[in-house]
């Protein structure tokens, strides 16, 4: 099991990288396709979001499977 502190540090690191990348993009760049890529930058960003939500769902299911309880959510905020 990965310690929660290590996961939080990794999340902060990834969040910082994503924020730097997104803040450096212009609207025009979002609609551009990188070299040798069939998708625009915006399409790839949305695909990554969809992929991460898939993993959240799998994690939720694993939690339910092992505890017989769903994680509690209020609105869009997770309540530990």
Image: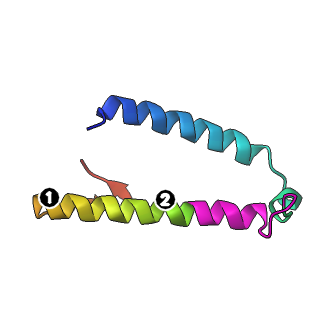
- Image coordinates of residue 32 in percent, x first then y, are 86, 63
Label 1, residues with CA under 10 Å away: few <14, some 14-19, many ≥20: few
- For residue 41, which quarter of the picture? bottom right
- Residue visible at 38% across and 60% down in the picture: 56
- Residue visible at 36% across and 65% down in the picture: 57
Secondary-structure class at tag 2:
helix
Left or right of residue 36, residue 50 in this image: left
- Report the residue marked by disc 1: 66
Compute the Cα span from label 2 to label 1.
21 Å
- Image coordinates of residue 20 in percent, x first then y, are 70, 39
Are discs 2 and 1 less than 8 Å apart at CB?
Answer: no
Residue 50 in the magenta stretch? The answer is no
- Image coordinates of residue 1 in percent, x first then y, are 26, 38
In this orientation, does residue 52 appear?
yes
Q: Is residue 62 above or below residue 25?
A: below
Q: Residue furthest left?
A: 68
- Image coordinates of residue 59 in percent, x first then y, are 31, 58
In this orientation, does residue 75 appear?
no
Q: Nearer the viewer, residue 35 or 69?
A: 35
Q: Is residue 22 above or below residue 58?
A: above
Residue 45 in the magenta stretch? The answer is yes
The part of the chain drawn in magenta is 34-48
Applied colour scheme: rainbow
Secondary-structure class at tag 1:
helix
- For residue 55, which quarter of the picture? bottom left
Left or right of residue 29, residue 21 in this image: left
- Residue visible at 14% across and 58% down in the picture: 66
- Report the residue marked by disc 2: 52
Compare marks 2 and 1 and give the one earlier in the sequence. 2
């Amino acid at each position: 099991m990965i310690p929660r502190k290590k996961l939080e540090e990794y999340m902060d690191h990834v969040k910082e990288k994503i924020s730097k990348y997104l803040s450096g993009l212009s609207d025009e760049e979002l609609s551009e396709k990188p070299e040798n890529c069939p998708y625009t930058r915006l399409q790839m960003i949305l695909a990554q979001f969809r992929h991460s939500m898939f993993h959240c769902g799998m994690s939720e299911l694993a939690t339910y499977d092992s505890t017989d309880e769903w994680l509690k959510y209020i609105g869009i905020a997770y309540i530990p």
